[in-house]
Image (cartoon, rainbow, N blue to C red):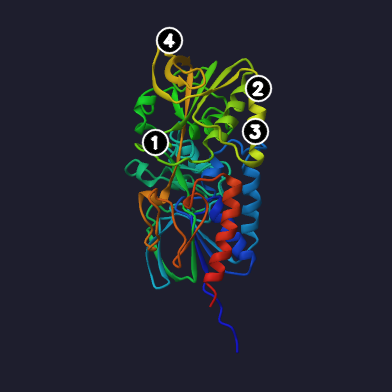
Amino acid sequence: MSETTPQPLLVVGAGIAGVTAALEAAEAGRDVVLLEKEASIGGRVLQLHHYFPKLCPPSCGMEINTRRLERNPRVRVLTRSEIQSAEDGKVTIRQAPAYVNDRCTACGKCCEVCPAKVADPHDLGMNEVPAIRIPHPHAWPYRYTLDREACPDGCRACVDACAYDAIDLDAKEREETIEVGSVVVATGWHAYPLDKLPELGGGTLPNVISNVQMERLASKTGPTGGKIQRPSDGEAPKKVAFVQCAGSRDRNHLPYCSSVCCLGSFKQALYVQEQDPESEVVIYYIDRRAFGRNEELLARLAGEKGVRLVKGKVGRVEAGEGGALKLRAEDVEAGRLIEDEADLVVLATGMVPNLKDGALPLGLERDEDGFGLDSNKAQVAGVARRPADVATCVRDATGAAARALAAGRA
């Protein structure tokens, strides 16, 4: 008796967890369809300056993965794509218009003549880029993308500049229905919005930024070329305050711990010290959480001259004189309330699962915080399941792929 061929595995989301799940399943012999709503894969990982604890760039790890994708014919990658509906194993996929097609050679002529500018989503809106551009230096597929709604009426400058007929301003949305045997959901996360933290200066004071913005400031591919600067005046800060649990472990915001925020701030404190060894860094925390081998990062930080760790919650951040910021906090170990000043304040905002903002049409169950739960309909991987660092997401995605393969056997 011949065995029937299993239906492909559908992986929703192509960040580090989704890419890992897709590759592990494909290399185990299953056909995979990998969906990504953005124009390129990689997700939040490629917005980081460095991983911890080794403090190495994430681009090299993702480059290995993209090479694995390129040489594995079992993986079909669909960017700019989302699930429109799903029923009885049939999934309808909606793909946004491909204004730039696969004839693009990334020559850059279109970008040179584009008159329109947009806030750069990869740099979290901290600078402007042409409406037609490579999404970021490590984008895969390495192809230009166009924000069509930003084009001036009647403008065809990019089309006229393209020698390869790679731009179609009239491209249409596409739909496709496929049958799948099992599903892995790896839709990732976004940072808790700064503007929900006005008492800490979020969204109101320009020199109060988020931890994810700090990663882009420190990155050589970021808006300042890797120089940590105050957004208000471009000056290098001499004193930086990190505020932990900004909106986390708080029933008014996110009731849970996002698990990586402490380590992220420890790492970013080292960014500041490396750029200016004479700078001063203060980290206000409730608990210092660094699990397993990541204790090495905390030990390294504790030995840095110019770094102070203060156990206590910051209650308010206000504008001071000369562009300085005033912090009102508690010092638990000293048993008193304190006031301090800083040139730049970094809020360690928590991780919000993207599933919380809108459930996929998969009948996926979620917990009270919006994180996905495994079921017979889908396996959940990475931060779609729980807050986690990159290494944990990779391990979790491998497990999700194994469970999905078992569930999807014909």
| Residue beneath disc 4 | 322
Q: Is residue 127 visible?
A: no
Q: Please state the horizontal and vertical placement of residue 229, each as a whole percent of the image.
A: 52, 22
Q: Please state the horizontal and vertical placement of residue 358, each as a whole percent of the image.
A: 35, 52
Q: CA distance from mark 2 to mark 1?
A: 30 Å
Between disc 2 and disc 1, whose residue precedes?
1
Say if mark 2 contacts mark 1, CB within 8 Å: no
Q: CA distance from mark 4 to mark 1?
A: 32 Å
Q: Please state the horizontal and vertical placement of residue 54, each as a whole percent of the image.
A: 67, 37
Q: Nearer the observer, disc 1 or disc 3? A: 1
Circle 4: residue type: Gly
Task: Classify mark 4: residues with Cα within 10 Å, few (<14), some (14-19) or many (20+).
Answer: few
Q: Please state the horizontal and vertical placement of residue 120, each as a whole percent of the image.
A: 45, 37
Q: Nearer the observer, disc 2 or disc 1? A: 1
| Residue beneath disc 2 | 304
Q: Residue furthest top?
A: 321
Circle 1: residue type: Asp
Between disc 4 and disc 2, whose residue precedes?
2
Q: Classify 218 as above or below 351.
A: above
Residue 338 or 238: which is nearer the viewer? Answer: 338
| Residue beneath disc 3 | 297
Say if mark 4 contacts mark 1, CB within 8 Å: no
Q: Residue at x 37, y 63 (%)?
A: 363
Between disc 1 and disc 3, whose residue precedes?
1
Between disc 4 and disc 3, whose residue precedes?
3
